[in-house]
Amino acid sequence: MATKVYIVYYSMYGHVEKLAEQIKKGAASVEGVEAKLWQVPETLSEEFLSKMSAPPKSDVPIITPGELAEADGLIFGFPTRFGMMAAQFKAFLDATGSLWRAQQLAGKPAGIFYSTGSQGGGQETTALTAITQLVHHGMVFVPIGYTFGAGMFEMEKVKGGSPYGAGTYAGDGSRQPSELELEQAFHQGKYIAAITKKLKGATA
């Protein structure tokens, strides 16, 4: 059976979604891995989103909490809000109580990726504060460390991401993920998918 890796994200302006697409490509590049994109439900009204100039959502399917249990590995993505994950993603995780009670996610490898508005806007704190969600579910956090190689030490260009996971800077919203940030996202997907496959094989 194929190893299932779910990339579950929330994206208001599309920056996180662009990273998610590359993460999916990276995960799918691992033989025997089936990667799938999912969005979490929006909690804001259309009227409010319109006032915030948010574009329409893509046609990526909306996930329900119970569907998380189907995955062998999970990679969660979200923009930051004051150094923490966006409320939409937190609301989704708050609805996973039944999975927590049964510890249905325990032992599953999980990664994190994110987008922030500025260089001091939460590239590390957003991931760091999100780890508590994984811990209570018993998931195994898989950071990318410095496995991305020289790209982790880029100093000439603005680059998001950290040893916690892939990331990008949105700025005022006009900046889009750079080629290097997208390469890091691809790497994260491939790296976590390979670990997920290995763990699944070891427990089969």
Image (cartoon, rainbow, N blue to C red):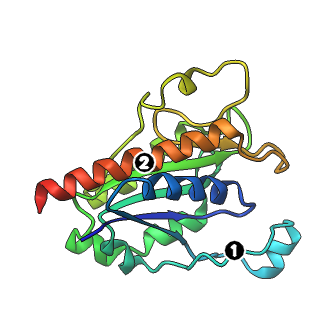
Quarter of the figure with residue 182: top right
Q: If you read the primary sequence from the N terminus, does the residue marked by circle 1 or circle 2 appear first?
A: 1
Percent of width and height locating residue 203: 12, 58
Q: Position of residue 46 (x, y in %)?
A: 78, 81
Q: Residue at x 31, y 75 (%)?
A: 70
Whole-percent x, y for residue 134 in the image:
35, 55
Image coords of residue 85 (percent x, y): 56, 54
Q: Secondary structure at mark 2?
A: helix
Going by the numbered disc 2, the residue's amino acid type is Lys
Pick the residue in front: 129 or 22: 22
Point 87% across, 66% down: residue: 53
**Mark carried by residue 58:** 1
Q: Is residue 202 left or right of residue 68?
A: left
Quadrant into which the N terminus falls: bottom left
At x 48%, y 51%, the residue is 26
Bin the neighbour count of mark 2 within 10 Å (Cα to Cα): few under 14, some 14-19, many 20 and up: many
Q: Which mark is residue 190?
A: 2
Image quarter hosting the C terminus: bottom left
Q: Considering only vertical position in the picture, is 182 above or below 61?
A: above
At label 1, which amino acid type do we have?
Answer: Ser
Residue 72 is tagged as none
What's the distance in space between the residues labelled 1 and 2, CA to CA?
A: 23 Å
Q: Tag 1: Cα neighbours inside 10 Å, few (<14), some, or many (≥20)?
A: few
Residue at 44% across, 27% down:
146
Choose between 67 and 45: the one closer to the eye: 67
Identify whether 110 is placed above or below 185: below
